[in-house]
Image: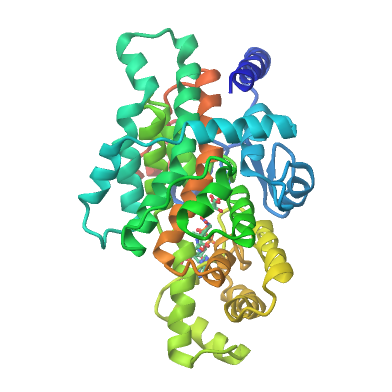
Amino acid sequence: MKDIKEKFKQKSEELGKEIKEILANHGEKEISSVKIRQLYQGMRGMPGLVSETSLLDPINGIRFRGFSIPELKEKLPTAEEGDEPLPEGLFYLMLIGELPSDKEVEEISNAMGRRSQIPKHVFNTIDELPIETHPMTQFVTGIMAMQTESIFAKAYKKGINKKDYWEYTFEDVTNLISRLPRLAAYIYRRKYRKGEHIEPNPELDWAGNFAHMLGFDNKEFRELMRLYLTIHADHEGGNASAHTTHLVGSTLSDPYLSFAGGMNSLAGPLHGLANQEVIRWIEQMRKEIGDGLPTKEQIENYVKQTLDAGKVVPGYGHAVLRQTDPRFTAQMNFAKEHLPDDDLVNVVWRIYDVVPDILKDLGKVKNPWPNVDAHSGALLVHYGLEEYEFYTVLFGVARSLGVLASLCWDRALGLPLERPKSLTTKRIKEIINGEEEV
Ligand code: NMX
Ligand code: MLT
């Protein structure tokens, strides 16, 4: 990773200079104003932070350093056995801002293999948790237990120059990303496979090795993991897991603590946990109306039942997107190629035919289209990974690539403590009445 670290240093120095100029020449330029409704409604659409790794367009969806998902599939290096992009390549792209060569991706894969060792006390800590503990709780516990390994925290304690924060962060980030598949696989095998663990295979790439350690050692599942970990890696900086990681990191908490914070955000059903909720919701529907392909009327009735009960339809809607999520489409294309006749996949597709019109008719849902979580579970079930409570852990392993690449940038650019201003409703009323300046 030495060359990549050196390249990152150079890139971050260049951008750091540009930002200084932007601040000096345009620091007072207004790019947006804040509406009272945004304060009460989750800051929708309010620019509040800078994140270099990706940018979300409401209609076209995610762009990783300018590249769409189909472009990543075309341009990023793949494993020899397949044609899905290697997530290590996306990590490089997000970190450096350029497409990697095959050699650079190989260098990352190898480094990740070498750095994937997890100290025993981490496994012991997880083993102390009751087996029924949700996998996301086990995951966060494991990340927290690994914090003992933080190079940043140790260096900070000794005393380091601000200018060098990024170097220790970079090391922690690379180590943590390398270790996460092992940790996640440990939790999966502990909870669902009688604790029969599988040793890593150093010959494999990051995603391929993850599939192997989970116990799904076939080419198609390895390819699915490469695609899955790529498309879930980042969704600009404002989503809850990225924003939390950034916020915690801004206090100079080390990458382990920051990422654990992000994963606690991901574990909520309006965010990453929606992938488990989708399969649970479909399972419930099938219990009520029987297996096989439901009719459109049956789905309509079930959706209305969900809405009448005051619940959301999981996997649909988005805070930013206003079209079908291209991550949904990427998974649909994978399914069309590899498993077009799968029962559950066909149910997911029929739900897609029915749900948007119902949500549109409600008149209040801003985006009636499916998001990434509407499709992911059905693919996993097909290959035998049926334990849906584990799905958000997979999302979390993927998300590490984006949020931790961003954390390297945060430290390299010397971004400060995040601390926005809050108001009280009393103060807002005073502002409305012209009694107070904002
Ligand atoms: N089913 C039913 N109602 C919905 C849905 C949905 N899928 N999506 C939005 N609404 C409702 C929402 O609850 C709100 O109702 P109310 O005014 O009564 O509180 C109203 O529509 C307006 O919400 P929006 O402005 O459209 O959505 P918002 O930006 O607030 O929330 C989500 C975005 C993603 C939280 C929301 O669409 C949702 O709850 N979706 C289902 C859960 C889900 O799939 N989450 C995963 C998101 C992707 N990810 O991985 O993180
Ligand atoms: C994500 O991938 O983080 C989700 O789609 C949520 C978001 O972008 O707000």
Left or right placement of residue 291 versus residue 189 in this view: right
Q: Quadrant of the N terminus?
A: top right
Compared across the picture, whether 281 is left or right of 15 comes to left
Residue 289 point in image, percent of width and height: 48, 92
Classify residue 9 as left or right of residue 334: left
In this rendering, the answer to whether 331 lies above or below 228 is below
Residue drawn at (68%, 68%) of the image: 335
Asked if 397 appears above or below 135 in the picture, the reply is above
Q: In the image, what residue occupies the spot 74% across and 42% down?
A: 76
75 over 7 or under it: above or below: below
Residue 97 image offset from top left, x and y in percent: 69, 29
The colour scheme is: rainbow
Residue 218 visible from this viewpoint = yes
Q: Quadrant of residue 423?
A: top left
The percent coordinates of residue 258 (x first, y second) are 39, 34
Residue 50 in view (yes/no): no
Where does the C terminus fall, quadrant-wise? Answer: top left
Residue at the image position 49 percent from the left and 63 percent from the top:
275
Which of the 4 image quarters holds residue 154?
Answer: top left
Give the total number of marks visible in the rendering.
0
